[in-house]
Image (cartoon, rainbow, N blue to C red):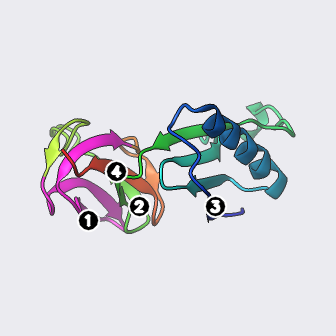
């Protein structure tokens, strides 16, 4: 499967601006033409990430409808470049808490300190604590509890100005 490609573009205006929406549409078209699963572009003012919706994993193959040739990608986020991304340092399973009955390490809106544990990634039966690389406020949690994650996949967005 093709991997995402990154590119720098001139500033395209604030999120929600017509140029940003047009850029997202052009990226969606490019995504299909190049056979990519996702594409991300960042400028000084905005970051646009477009990715294809994944097919359900648990459904038996016989019950899945055939994929449409012009499958519509999703615009998954328009993010301020001031936010800091905490990425997965390894492949594994993402957990928000130390056990199924424990409270999550962090919630959206929580203040965090640099070095504070924000989640666990289980890899090869080992639980690896993932720490915040900056202090600030959790702006978004990008991964669901129990979801498989890949190396470099964004997990959290932290606003360091909070």
Whole-number angstrom distance, CA of label 1 to CA of label 2: 9 Å
Eyeballing the image, is 34 above or below 67? below
Number of residues whose C-alpha sits closer than 10 Å to that of mark 3, classed few (under 14), some (14–19) or many (20 or more): some
Which residue carries the number 2 mark? 92
| Residue at 45 percent of width and 53 percent of height | 148
Magenta span of residues:
113-141
Name the mark nearer the viewer: 3 or 1. Answer: 3
Q: Residue 81: x percent and y percent? A: 41, 52
Of residue 162 and residue 85, the one placed in the foreground of this image is: 162
Which residue carries the number 4 mark? 83
Which residue carries the number 3 mark? 4
Contact? badges 1 and 4 (CB < 8 Å): no
The earlier-in-sequence mark between 3 and 4 is: 3
Q: Magenta part mainly helix, strand or loop? A: strand
Q: Residue 51: x percent and y percent? A: 63, 46
| Residue at 68 percent of width and 43 percent of height | 23
Disc 1, SS: strand
Disc 2, SS: strand
Which residue carries the number 1 mark? 128
């Amino acid at each position: 499967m093709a991997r995402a490609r990154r590119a720098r573009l001139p500033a395209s205006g604030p999120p929600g601006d017509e140029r940003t929406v047009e850029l997202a549409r052009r990226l969606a078209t490019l995504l299909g033409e190049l056979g990519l699963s996702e594409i991300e572009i960042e400028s000084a003012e905005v970051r646009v990430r477009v990715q294809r919706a994944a097919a359900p994993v648990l459904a038996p193959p016989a019950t899945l409808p055939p994929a449409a040739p012009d499958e519509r990608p999703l615009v998954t986020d328009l993010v301020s470049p001031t936010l800091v991304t905490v990425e997965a340092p390894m492949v594994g399973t993402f957990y928000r808490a130390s056990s199924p009955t424990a409270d999550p390490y962090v919630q959206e809106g929580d203040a965090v300190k640099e070095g504070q544990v924000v989640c666990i990634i289980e890899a090869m039966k080992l639980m690896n604590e993932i720490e915040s690389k900056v202090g600030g406020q959790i702006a978004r949690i990008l991964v669901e509890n129990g979801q498989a994650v890949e190396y470099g996949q964004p997990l959290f967005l932290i606003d360091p100005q909070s």
